[in-house]
Amino acid sequence: MKQFTAFLFSIFLMSCTYSSFLEKDYSINQGKMVTVGSPIISWALGKEEDGKKEGMKKELIYGGVSQGVLQFTYREYEIIEPMGTYARPAFSQDLKYDVPSDSIITYKDVIFKIHSFSGQRIQYTVIQDPAEVKNYKPSSGLSTMGYYAIIIPALLVVDIIILSSIN
């Protein structure tokens, strides 16, 4: 019976873990073309616990060109699943670059080369990841529930030992 209880407890602990995640929609040194309103680069980092994701999604969206000036919008979203992904309005920024074709643009450690652009689309190549993507190291561990699953039984054992020593 003790072995079966230990087995069930170990299965419970395994279900009380988290792991980090990284999602990105681009590849380094691979040319790409997007239309107005589409992300040029998008990435998300966070942790997944009990099938639910929490973290941040960041993207740089192409806004077209006006009088030779490229327009972009940088946005950050808070990821809260299963409810969905929500924008954080304080983390949105409009950007403008007055550059010719074959220019290199840097924003938040992201480096990309513009090959050509129009009011409808842009062709580019991402040369360097954002620092947080470049430095990403997968991690995992016990969730809060996992810690409680260890601490509460340990405290009960300590209580039993203390109470038995009093009697």
Image: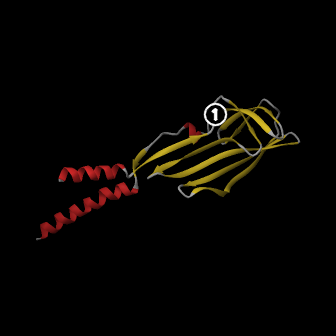
Question: Could you tell me which residue is drawn at 60 percent across and 48 percent down?
Answer: 57
Please determine whether, in this image, residue 24 is positioned above or below residue 81. Answer: above
Q: Mark 1: give few (<14), some (14-19) or many (20+) Cα within 10 Å.
A: some
Please determine whether, in this image, residue 160 is positioned above or below residue 104. Answer: below
- Marks counted in the figure total 1
Instruction: Where is residue 105? Give x, y as percent.
Output: 73, 36
Q: Nearer the viewer, residue 79 or 138?
A: 79
Q: How is the image coloured?
A: secondary structure
Question: Could you tell me which residue is drawn at 18 percent across and 65 percent down?
Answer: 160
Question: Could you tell me which residue is drawn at 30 percent across and 56 percent down?
Answer: 150
Picture quarter with the C terminus: bottom left
Instruction: Where is residue 34? Give x, y as percent.
Output: 73, 38
Q: Residue furthest right?
A: 67
Please determine whether, in this image, residue 20 is positioned above or below residue 122. Answer: below
Instruction: Where is residue 111? Give x, y as percent.
Output: 68, 35
Q: Residue furthest left?
A: 167
Q: Residue furthest bottom?
A: 167
Q: Nearer the viewer, residue 89 or 98?
A: 89
List the residue tagged with mark 1. 128
Instruction: Where is residue 156? Give x, y as percent.
Output: 24, 63
Drawn side of residue 158 relative to residue 59, left or right? left
- State which quadrant residue 110 falls in: top right
Question: Could you tell me which residue is drawn at 54 percent across and 38 percent down?
Answer: 135
Please determine whether, in this image, residue 69 is positioned above or below residue 81. Answer: above
Drawn side of residue 128 relative to residue 153, left or right? right
- Under mark 1, the amino acid is Gln
Classify mark 1: helix, strand or loop: strand
Drawn side of residue 137 relative to residue 88, left or right? left
